[in-house]
Image (cartoon, rainbow, N blue to C red):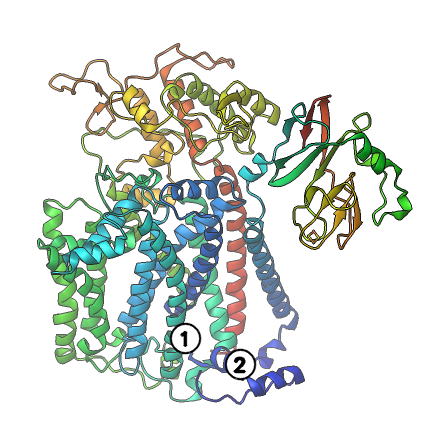
Amino acid sequence: MSGPSDFQPSNPALKWIERRLPIFGLIHSSFVAYPTPRNLNYWWTFGAILSMMLGLQILTGVILAMHYTPHADLAFKSVELIVRDVNYGWLLRNMHAAGASMFFFAVYIHMFRGLYYGSYKEPREVLWILGVIIYLLMMATGFMGYVLPWGQMSFWGATVITNLFSAVPYFGESIVTLLWGGYSVGNPTLNRFFSLHYLLPFVIAGVVVLHIWALHVAGQNNPAGVEAKTEKDTVPFTPYATIKDAFGVSCFLIFFAWFIFYMPNYLGDADNYIPANPGVTPAHIVPEWYYLPFYAILRSIPNKLAGVVAMFSAIIILCFLPWLDSARTRSSKYRPLAKQFFWIFVVVCIGLGYLGSQPPEGIYVIAGRILTVCYFAYFLIVLPLLARIETPRPVPNSIADDVLAKSKGRAATAASVVLALVLAGGLFAGSIQNAKAEEGGDTPPALSWSFSGPFGKYDRGSLQRGLKVYKEVCSACHSLNYVAFRNLADPGGPGYSEAQAAAFASEYKIKDGPNDQGEMFERPGRTADYFPAPFPNEQAAAAANGGKAPPDLSLMAKARSYKRGFPQFVFDFFTQYQEQGPDYVDAILQGFEDKPPAGVTVPEGTYYNKFFPGHAIKMPKPLSDGQVTFDDGAPATVKQYAHDVTTFLMWAAEPHMEARKRIGMQVFVFLIIFAFLMYFTKRKVWADAH
Amino acid sequence: MTTASSADHPTRRDFLFVATGAAAAVGAAATVWPLVAQMNPDAATIAAGAPIQVDLTPIAEGQDIKVFWRGKPIYISHRTKKQIEEAQKVPLSSLPDPQPDSARVKSGHDQWLVVIGICTHLGCIPIAHEGNYDGFFCPCHGSQYDSSGRIRQGPAPANLAVPPYAFLSDTKIQIG
Ligand code: FES
């Protein structure tokens, strides 16, 4: 894309094509011969990482769309079926969901890099603005994608975000109705979001082409911020930049794989494992972590319209950056003051992200306002002012000089970049974990589970006992809609044989029909059947249980969580702690007390539970000692019951966990070996360039 | 620019490049596997394809019913004496896909023909009791099957397939 190329293929067939469509010349001049500054550091590999992420998101997304059903009644279930039944469906879904976070993580680093090294300055203004447009499109795509699983956070996130447009004077309500296609968020909304979520990534890909085109016209910026002048300043894109990018990508994949295989729920919200319910809003509506800074800005402003305007301005202001910062020196390396303010700005952004995840009350609101002012002040006051008053240090004469000046001590760069990435990832992304504030409940004790950690496996005996507890106790009121009898014989499950599963199924009466006479009939269960629900519908379940239907238990172990708090959630990232759900369920089952403590009363029809938020739970104490007898001699105690049934429910919620962790280990071993190979290959290739 | 140092350690360098390239190829192949495997039937579909049982008592002589197994229509015909005789009499040498009638029904249950009702030409559903052979006629491109479900005329290359099935009793079969 940098002018006509002198590339001439030697193969006659390629020559024939080249004369009619000079595509090989285009590729050659853009990605092979293209001169790239020789002093680029690893922050520059994020362009390649982002390209890979876009490709990967499109690929996994197209695949998920083959199995997904965009209908309000079926969407949640179809996502569960993808995870449970589709071959490697759990892997594809984790890749796509974690991939969205990784995409944003990489784009933030890419943007901060541009900010630090002044990559938006003349002549790269259009390049930068195209980048901001891509970022906006990414936000829209990510938001609509989050709506598709149609869980509680999907639904209420969609409601809150679309309602932003109601702040528009005069036309607000009409715009929102137009977005919804109804009087509230519903099936038409889901359908159009699905359509647009499929469309926008291809729009992004189109703008990325423009972005790269603009990049190749202006040439890449570099850490020194001086333009390439002679041949000595550059190296050909292939093999030098290609191999370096490939190494950066392979390191990033290690980070990515950590989430896919070991922390798939770390970045998500437990509430999204509860199907969308238009009648109940979750206690704390929190967007995905990558929107949190802007969410904090929105909430800092006590006026609806002004809040929305501030939030959008916070993004739009980036477009004006090339003119707000008129300093001649590009790279902050040579701008002592700008460098310090840059890091303060980074801290402000992370701080806003943290505040966005906190409840909007007290000190958080005040801090949010201060940081909002800081955010805008950076662009509107600090940068314009610095351009006038700052005396930059002298920049190197040329890129070659810059390289010579620091040819020592660059071996450690790669390692430190990886380390910084992992640390920053844990900190930055982890802030979402803080979002779950459960008021008025004791913190459940962290228990030890056989399925925790990278080698965790379900305890078969515990699963079988837990199944018995579910069957004899829980199933009287709670359904288990997403578990089929055949699952009892699946690998990584309770370890029954096909025949045992069939025998277990045949003990159940399943409603089937209509038959040839048009009547419903009952027949013995088959392995393909699902656990039958105790009540024919939600209304019947509610009527029989004091007005509130007992929730389905299939996803219970993932749909409940509790606040881990700072800095615990940071450690959790490294220790792979994912067991908030089981800890909570186990604690609830054991947390009943016959008499509330002195001075505490619970309303009529509710029971005191130490660990339930607010303490008043509608479920009466379900388990008591001796209620279920086990054949294997395990003690018939509530403690044992709670442990076993929780293990069983964890398996019900995550039936492929063992496969996930096993494949994860293989992937990790491979990726680490591959990254080492890439590193040495990269060193060999670059040995000639220094 | 690469020649200077490649002369120093040609083998070590080549080994490293080959190893890295091979690792990349292995990784790519391992990644493609799940991306393709996801297109195969999922566990729920496979479970739903379990064997089905069909009661034959309501089917009178000369009648047939259509049931579905794994999404495929299965014709169960209660053949008349005449149909059975025709099917047994026809010389095998005159058939495009020679198969005796005895190989297409269960012995002792000559009156029951169970075939997958999907034309072996391009997958349309043949109509029962039509055509010149007292069997099936496919409206799509005119293939004709006889009372044993064997191809007699038209573009279809093979006989209608017989699904796996067994008699549980004289009046009940299990397909699958
Ligand atoms: S499909 Fe039956 S004749 Fe072509």
| Left or right: A653, with A619 as reference point | right
Chain bearing mark 2:
A
| Left or right: B129, with A553 as reference point | right
Q: Which mark identifies residue A558? A: none
Asked if residue A352 can be seen in this view, the reply is no
Between marks 2 and 1 in the image, the one whose residue lies nearer the viewer: 2
Chain bearing mark 1:
A
Amino acid type of disc 2?
Ile
Q: Badge 2: how crowded within 10 Å, few (<14), some, or many (20+)? A: few
Residue A396, position as x, y percentages in the image: 31, 83
Residue A62, position as x, y percentages in the image: 47, 56
Q: Which residue is mark 2?
A: A23
> Relative to the observer, which residue lies in front, A257 or B96?
B96
> Relative to the observer, which residue lies in front, A448 or A407?
A448
Q: Secondary structure at mark 2?
A: helix
Question: In the figure, residue A153 lies in which quadrant?
Answer: top left
- From what the image shows, is residue A594 above or below residue A421? above
- From what the image shows, is residue A448 above or below residue A109? above
Q: Quadrant of the C terminus of chain B?
A: top right
Amino acid type of disc 1?
Ser
Q: Quadrant of the N terminus of chain B?
A: bottom right
Q: Which mark identifies residue A407? A: 1
Q: Of all residues shown, which one is farthest toward the top?
A: A626
